[in-house]
Image (cartoon, rainbow, N blue to C red):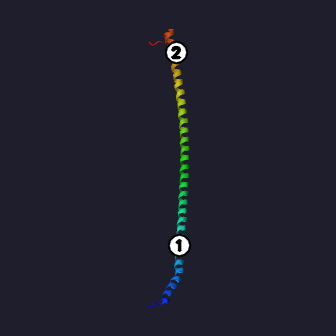
Amino acid sequence: MKTSRLPIALLFGAALALSPAISLSQSQDDNSVTKDAKKAGNETKKGTDKAYNSTKNGSEKAYDKTKQGTKDAANSTEKSTEKAYDKTKEGTKDAADSTEKGTKKAWNKTKDATTGDDSKKPQ
């Protein structure tokens, strides 16, 4: 049995002729995959940048609010302390004046009682 070499040669020739077309379609798929990967990488980078900027802006706003709140609290405390100081100063002065007057009054009564001034003795 003798086989003809022509059909086998045609089959191999066809396979060789189609192989570049198959490899070209594969490289196009590879390009598509590469493009998709690059696009995904760029989208990830953009998303990361947006998240970073949002976090940064939020942190700056929180810092500014905290700073302002601290200043307000410090000013309020300072004003309250000054008011308390003034009230204490007034109260202390009033108490000192009252004590001085009371002491003088007591001294005078004691002095009068010890000198024997009968006009001021209780009856």
Is 41 drawn above or below residue 66 in the view shown?
below
Instruction: Provide residue 120's location: percent of width, then percent of height.
Output: 49, 13
User: Callout 1: few (<14), some (14-19), or many (20+) C-alpha neighbours within 10 Å?
Assistant: few
State the residue at coordinates (55%, 30%).
89
Q: Position of residue 79 (x, y in %)?
A: 55, 38
Q: How many marks on residues?
A: 2
What residue do we see at 51% from left, 87% from top? 9
- Choose mark 1 or mark 2, whichever is in front: 1
Q: Nearer the viewer, residue 20 or 119?
A: 20
Classify 10 Å Cα crowding around label 2: few (below 14), some (14-19), many (20 and above). few
The residue type indicated by label 2 comes to Asn
Q: Which is nearer the eye, 3 or 46?
A: 3
- Residue at 55% from the left image edge and 38% from the top image edge: 78
**At 55% across and 54% down in the image, what residue appears?**
56
Q: According to the image, label 1 marks what residue?
A: 30
Query: Callout 2: helix, strand or loop?
Result: helix
Residue toward you, 20 or 96: 20
Question: Which part of the image, by quadrant, shows the C terminus?
Answer: top left
* Mark number, residue 104: none
Q: Amino acid at mark 1?
A: Asp
Q: On screen, 58 above or below 77?
A: below
Q: Position of residue 92 (x, y in %)?
A: 53, 27
Q: Which residue matches tag 2?
A: 108
* Label 1 secondary element: helix
CA gap between label 1 and label 2 equals 115 Å
Residue most extreme to the top: 116
Q: Are marks 1 and 2 in contact (CB under 8 Å)?
A: no
Residue 20 sits in quarter? bottom right
Give how far across and how far down residue 1 sits, in percent.
43, 91
Is tag 1's residue or tag 2's residue first in the polypeptide sequence?
1
In the displayed structure, 24 sits above or below 107; it is below
| Residue closer to the observer: 55 or 99 | 55
